[in-house]
Amino acid sequence: PAQTHVVVQSGFQIYWVHNVPNPEESDFMMLPHVSRIRESIDQIQPDLVMCGSKGGAYGVALWQMGYWRGPTLLINAHPSCTELPYDVPIVVTHGDQDPVYPRPREELEHLISTGSRSMCFLYYSSTSGTLASGHTPRVGDQHNMASLIHFETLPRLMDSVLCPEGPELHMMRTWLDRLSHQRLEAERGLGYTSSQLRKFWVSAHTKANMGSGDFLFDVPRGSLESHLVAAAFRASAKDPSTYGYSKERWDRVAIMRIQRIENAVQSESGNTPYYHSVRQSFEAQGIEFVPGVH
């Protein structure tokens, strides 16, 4: 019910197929029931087919019988799903604490690799490491995939499998949506590329990059740069912190000093060539390169 509510609130229209039995029962015959689902697909003409838990067996059957070759989202990787069809956009979600269909991450990553390049995406909810305090701040999803209702994750995954550029790229673009307006404005003011960041440099008028070895420069208090760095440092995300971050305590932390690193050799021989290489790679694939995302 919670996942349904999130999807409906995001503006999606849902058509349910209820009149099919549990495909994991003994002596189950798939053909007559998957044919009934095909009739619903022909009637509704959906943009996206979603299957959850045992319904994943029906999703696999739709692929195998050629009844559906459109965007598909599988909530839980059903054991019958061992290979993905060619040229079909697919998103698979799974949690590392799933007691019903336990599947290791390596197996799921291999599953995604069987699909068409740049058309398939794995959303894997895993358990984090244990902190020194003994606390585990993030526990991976069980069978109900509870994380999908947070951070607009499920609607974002649905949009991603419908995106012509591919699900992974779409999910990357949505990262910016999770940042606050203050953080985004501060980052834009500072710049996302090496050339943009260098607009604040002062070493062009010194000998810092000509053998002195001094690459650190104090950012003047009260300057625009100082204000932007502090704003980015203090800005909260839209979503609550997994690690118990307290905005009230963070706001009381005093910024004593801000320093800028100015290393022209590193920038020109390392950062800049890498930036242009990544940009050219995206453009060669016909994909828009977006600084701040890639």
Image (spheres, rainbow, N blue to C red):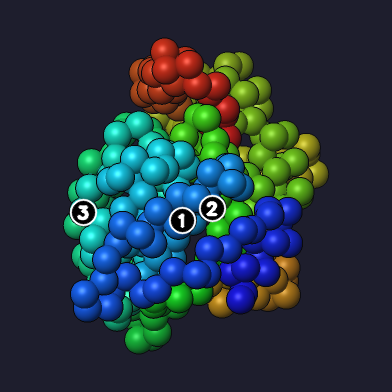
Q: CA distance from mark 3 to mark 2?
A: 25 Å
Residue at (52% x, 30% y) in the render: 164
- Which residue of the protein is positioned furthest toward the bottom in this rendering? 134
**Pointer 2 residue:** 40
At a point 45% along the width and 50% down the height, the residue shown is 38
Circles 1 and 2: CB atoms closer than 8 Å: yes
Q: Tell me the CA gap for discs 1 and 3.
A: 21 Å
**Where residue 227 sits in the image (x, y, percent)?**
76, 45
Q: Earlier in the sequence, mark 3 or mark 2?
A: 2
- Residue 250 visible in image: no
Q: Which mark is residue 82?
A: 3
Label 3 sits on a secondary structure element that is: loop
**Residue 110, position as x, y percentages in the image:** 20, 49
Percent across and percent down for residue 16 are: 58, 63
Q: Which residue lies at the image location 50% right of the left edge and 21% below the top edge? A: 287
**Viewer-nearest residue: 133 or 289:** 289
Query: Which residue corresponds to mark 1?
Result: 37
